[in-house]
Amino acid sequence: MQSIGQAKPTRFVGGLSWRNLLLLLIVLCLVSITMAVMLGPVKIAPLTVWKVAMSHLPFWGPSIVPDWSKAQEHIIWEIRFPRVILAAVAGAGLALAGAVIQALLRNSLADPYILGVSSGSSVMAVMVIIFGALPMFGQYALSIAAFLGALVSMIVVYMLANVSGIITTSRLLLSGIAISMVLSSITSFIVMMAPREQGIRDAMFWMMGSFSGAKWEYVIIPGCAVFVGFIFLLFQYRGLNALLMGEEAAKTLGINTNSLRKVLLIVASLLTGVIVAVCGSIGFIGLMIPHIARFLVGSDHRRVLPVSVLLGVLLAIWGDVLARLVLAPEEVPIGVVTSICGGPFFIWLLRRNSYTFGGGNR
């Protein structure tokens, strides 16, 4: 790191300036969203995709003359668009949470699930899937149960790590791992006790992540959470840079590490919990994307956070496209796709001499 929050003007991969790199990623995200909506059993023209989307805008919509069928509108607006946007939101949120957790714990192997959030969600989710728990919430029972599980596990980890009002990195990490292992064992026991084979299959599918149940109403809360979380974390980039340098260095720079750590823990856990509640546990995005972002733009979180968000969007969208098209009409859990496709690239990245975790710009 060159300095706390004051990176020197420089050029990044391919000789691109910071502004051009960000612009390139935004364009790639828009192209990816368009293509992801187009691809499927029913082919859709790119212009039709955006005309249908804009026709639902409050003021612009009435001025667009429909030249598409009702079936096309249903496929685009009710089926594919919510799924693609949910994938984008989930990818952005998990990448964001991963970048924060890695800086918080100063651990290159940390991901959004290391604090037991995913394990807590899984316990409650399999209870709903296998035994039909929380029937009073109807179609939202799974999402609500998963979020409650994430919330409870997060509170337990926080209480275990908090000794005399102080949370240290090592206590936080070990508490998270311990709770995660206990809850994973409970989940395995519940799955083993499942009375129906289909219940086991559904539970396993949910635990590996999927956007197949996407609806517009599922997008709103995670979307707002990711947007607000991103803006908040962007204002905390100096603190994140300081934490990455080490606790003593951060204190020397005047950072209240204990307070900052608590706030970042809550934000990252809530982000992860909201996403897991609607999509299940999607592995690898939160671990891999922040490393790729640091490889591209160095360790300054003013740049790492936006680039992580955009890369997370790209990976989640294309991972979902592969998940639904490779074995169509069957669907592969997206967690399987992100791991198979992202793993080799991640290994190649880590073996490059020019990349170091938190060790400064290339």
Image: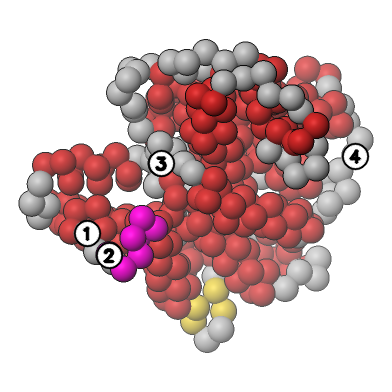
Judging by the rendered image, the residue that carries numbered circle 4 is 8
- Badge 1 vs badge 2, beta-carbon distance below 8 Å: yes
Q: Nearer the viewer, mark 4 or mark 3?
A: 3
Question: CA–CA distance between discs 1 and 2?
Answer: 6 Å
Judging by the rendered image, the residue that carries numbered circle 2 is 135
Query: Going from the N terminus, do you reach mark 1 or mark 3 first?
Result: 1
Q: In the image, which disc is placed on residue 259? A: none
Part of the protein shown in magenta = 135-141
As shown in the figure, which amino acid type bears the numbered disc 4?
Lys
Along the line of sight, which residue is nearer the eye, 51 or 326?
51
Query: Going from the N terminus, do you reach mark 3 or mark 2 first?
Result: 2
Judging by the rendered image, the residue that carries numbered circle 1 is 132
Image quadrant occupied by the C terminus: top right
- In the visual, does 342 lie left or right of 189? right
Question: CA–CA distance between discs 3 and 2?
Answer: 18 Å
- Rendering quarter of residue 41: top left
36 w.r.t. 234: above or below:
above
Q: Residues within 10 Å of mark 4 (few under 14, many from 20)?
A: few
Query: Going from the N terminus, do you reach mark 2 or mark 4 first?
Result: 4
Residue 353, horizontal then vertical, whole percent: 63, 25
- Rendering quarter of residue 211: top left
Question: CA–CA distance between discs 4 and 3?
Answer: 45 Å
Judging by the rendered image, the residue that carries numbered circle 3 is 213
Q: Residues within 10 Å of mark 3 (few under 14, many from 20)?
A: few
Inspect the magenta stretch and tell me whether residue 136 lies in it.
yes
